[in-house]
Image: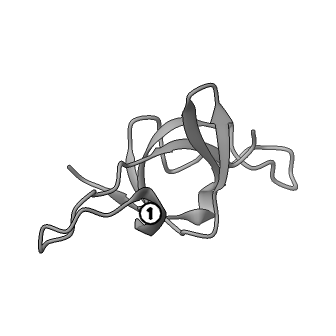
Amino acid sequence: MGDRIVARREVSEQTTAGGIVLPDSAREKPSRGVVLSVGEGRLLKDGTRSTLQVKPGDKILFTTYGPDEIKLGDDEVLLMREEDVLAIIDG
């Protein structure tokens, strides 16, 4: 997988602050998730691999345009490069 990460997107809110219930089509997909798996790191010119800064279980903030959505059975996971991760979130 190189420098790629498999993550699961957080569940988005179903109601607004004012109490209006939003249908699936009107909801904005959250750009937060949890890392499920990581690759071995990018292969460098000298033949070594760079180490990834994220690890399974990390909560992350990522770009909305970066990840590819993949359907695995009933689950939907995201495949993205480490460079698409904007931040690791505590808590």
Q: Amino acid at mark 1?
A: Ser
Circle 1 — which element?
A: loop
Total marks drawn? 1
Q: For the point 41% across and 61% down, which residue is it?
A: 30
Q: Is residue 72 left or right of residue 13?
A: right
Q: Quadrant of residue 57?
A: top left
Local packing at callout 1 (Cα closer than 10 Å; few below 14, some 14-19, many 20+) is some
Q: Quadrant of residue 84?
A: bottom right
Q: Quadrant of residue 75?
A: top right
Q: Residue furthest bottom?
A: 18
Q: Closer to the camera, 53 or 76?
A: 76
Q: Is residue 68 left or right of residue 89?
A: right
Q: Closer to the camera, 30 or 54?
A: 30
Residue hosting label 1: 31
Q: Is residue 54 left or right of residue 11?
A: right
Where does residue 8 sit, x and y in percent of width and height?
48, 42
Say which quadrant the N terminus sits in.
Answer: top right
Q: For the point 12% across and 74% down, which residue is it?
A: 18
Q: How is the image coloured?
A: one colour
Q: For the point 63% across and 58% down, which residue is it?
A: 67
Q: For the point 20% across and 68% down, which residue is it?
A: 20
Where does residue 21 sit, x and y in percent of width and height?
24, 62
Above or below, comparing residue 61 to residue 41 in the picture: below
Where does residue 11 sit, x and y in percent of width and height?
35, 48
Q: Is residue 88 left or right of residue 6?
A: left
Where does residue 78 sit, x and y in percent of width and height?
59, 47
Q: Residue furthest top?
A: 73
